[in-house]
Amino acid sequence: MRKKRLLWVIYPYYLVIALASLAAITWYDCAALQVFYKDRTREELLARAMLLEKRFLIELAAGNSERIDALCKELGKKGAMRITVVLPDGTVAGDSDESPKQMDNHADRPEIIAALANSSGNTERYSHTLHEARCYVAIPLHEGSKILGVLRTSVSVKSIESALNTIRFRIIAICAAMALMVAATSWWFLRRITRPLEVLRTGAERLAEGDLTYKLSVGDIQEFGALAESLNRMAAALDEKIRDLVSQGNERESILSSMAEGVLAVDAEERLLRVNEAAAKLLGIDAEQAAGRTLQEVVRNRELQRLVASVLSSHRPREDEIVLRGERGERYLQAQGTVLRDARQIRGALVILHEVTQLKKLEKVRRDFVANVSHELRTPVTSIKGFVETLLDGAMHNPEELPRFLQIVAVQTDRLNAIIEDLLTLSRIEQEEEKAEIALGQAAVRSVLETAVEVCRMKAAEKNVRLEMTCDAELTAAVNAPLLEQAVINLIDNAIKYSSPEQAVLVTAEPGDGEIAIRVRDRGCGIGREHLPRIFERFYRVDKARSRKLGGTGLGLAIVKHIAQAHGGRATVESTPGQGSTFTIHLPHPHPSLRSPKN
Ligand code: ADP
């Protein structure tokens, strides 16, 4: 329904009441005036009749009817009224306006009847003589107790009405002017009340639209002024509260978005209320598009859906591990769900997501490592145990077998020792790397390579493998010389192991794009493509039997990788089966931020 303005609600009623009151007053005044005027006319007619009573009594007593008529005409003209004298039998003796002879007998006229009954009579009726409505007053003319006739005075009702109409017109004109004045003043008066209200309304609208700095001001009316003041105070308080809320919201927002953990809030219908950046990234969704949609629509993960449903139905915290399967493989999330409640009621559920993929991987690496170490150690230990038992069972008394068995036990013990040595080396490098304890110092790369080549020369000669080395004598790098030597030795050792006699192993070092590449190249058996990504893992071997036969522990390349990392570099491999392999240690060069060497 269309709402009316207050002015148009009040003003018509106001106007109707004012006009009705004025009309009632006018009507009452006119009616009272008419009664008063007619009474006054009758009293006047009576007074005039009484004044003329004596004169007509004389003429009546004299019986001079012509004189009576002439007197009627003369006095009637002077008094601007009609004067009639009627004899007791009703005959008209004289009349100011007509010839008495032509007039009817007036004995039946009400005023005459009343006057003949010895009282004054008055009436207002139609005159058949003059053919108009008139007002009559008649008094008896008596001499002693004898009534000689009736003297009647009259005026035309029309003349009374026209006099009354003049007065009525004036009254109505004044009342109309007053009505106009009332209409105008009441309009002005109502506008004076409604205008501040309108100012208040438009001001309140601006406040409602959010312009809380707007200040209301309304004229000089105390009540409106107080209301505007209250509204201004309320707006200022609201403004402050909103500022507080906004800053709290911003704070919450920045906490949520800078959290590494994913935060996800849903309502009781499982519609997403909030998804922070970390959660959106973990779940691979668009936080803005997700808001308001159901969890089932947005996140297609049964475990997460189950967790949320369980929190919502049980109102208890729940914890679960969620596996996400995507392009980047399996990712593991630790999800903690709690009930989301405000001061009064439960609003939904809150889920905190914590990525534990790396932890899982590390756990797996640790498990695998323990299993691998046990496995690697068991082989020589079982072998040693077997031969020792055989010896104890009597073989030690056999002079032929004793040295052979002891030789095998010695080889296995060496193997055990080699594994333990390598494991200790690895763990030492890792620990020192973790604690940043590996001291690096500027050294000539060539001297490192020379030492490594020298260490391996014997082995190379045994296998008849040529060892060649090229390196610029000026080339220096920030290195931990003993560690880097160890890494290069491991690579040369492998190259010799997996090369055939007469083949050459080439050791080079050259500066490249921001790094120094130390390469160990052989023309040996090479490594299959499928093994390359895992070749630097601990205990990973392409051919286990061959590696063992050659005295390998499966840890050599893992040690190389860790030494390279300890230098801030990396280790890589390129290989073609049947053509040979090239292992490279990439060292950063130059590297201004290298850790300063410890003395
Ligand atoms: P291992 O002690 O068995 O040599 P490493 O970690 O040094 O262990 O090497 C891992 C595996 O990588 C070896 O078992 C071998 O199969 C392969 N490998 C390493 N170096 C070479 C190479 N130069 N040529 C061919 N295969 C190699």
Image (cartoon, grey):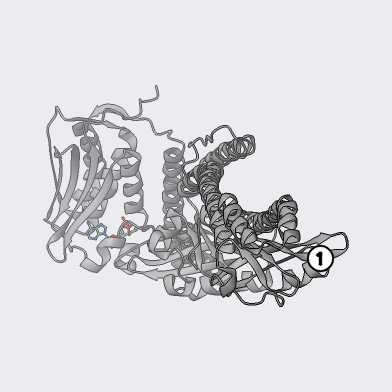
What percent of the width, then of the height, locates residue 584? 21, 48
Label 1: state its secondary structure.
strand
What percent of the width, then of the height, locates residue 222? 63, 34
Q: Is residue 338 above or below residue 455?
A: below
Q: Nearer the viewer, residue 261 or 78?
A: 78
Task: List the single residue furthest toward the top.
Answer: 599
- Residue 154 visible in the current orientation: no
Q: Nearer the viewer, residue 236 or 472?
A: 236
Q: Give the amino acid type for the residue marked by disc 1 in the picture.
A: Ile
Question: Which residue is depicted at the point 52% across and 70% down?
Answer: 304
Rendering quadrant holding ligand 1: bottom left
Give the tally of numbered discs.
1
Q: Is 24 displayed left or right of 174 in the figure?
A: right
Question: Which residue is depicted at the point 54% across and 36% down?
Answer: 218
What percent of the width, then of the height, locates residue 34? 65, 58
The residue tagged 1 is 147
Question: Which residue is depicted at the point 81% across and 61% down?
Answer: 142
Q: Nearer the viewer, residue 378 or 111?
A: 111
Q: Is residue 67 above or below residue 435?
A: below
What percent of the width, then of the height, locates residue 466? 13, 49
Q: Nearer the viewer, residue 454 or 431?
A: 431
Q: Is 45 displayed left or right of 287 in the figure?
A: right
Q: Is residue 367 above or below residue 428?
A: below
Q: Is residue 457 above or below residue 382?
A: above
Quarter of the image with the C terminus is top left
Task: List the single residue furthest toward the right.
Answer: 145
- Residue 294 visible in the current orientation: yes
Q: Residues within 10 Å of mark 1 (few under 14, many from 20)?
A: some
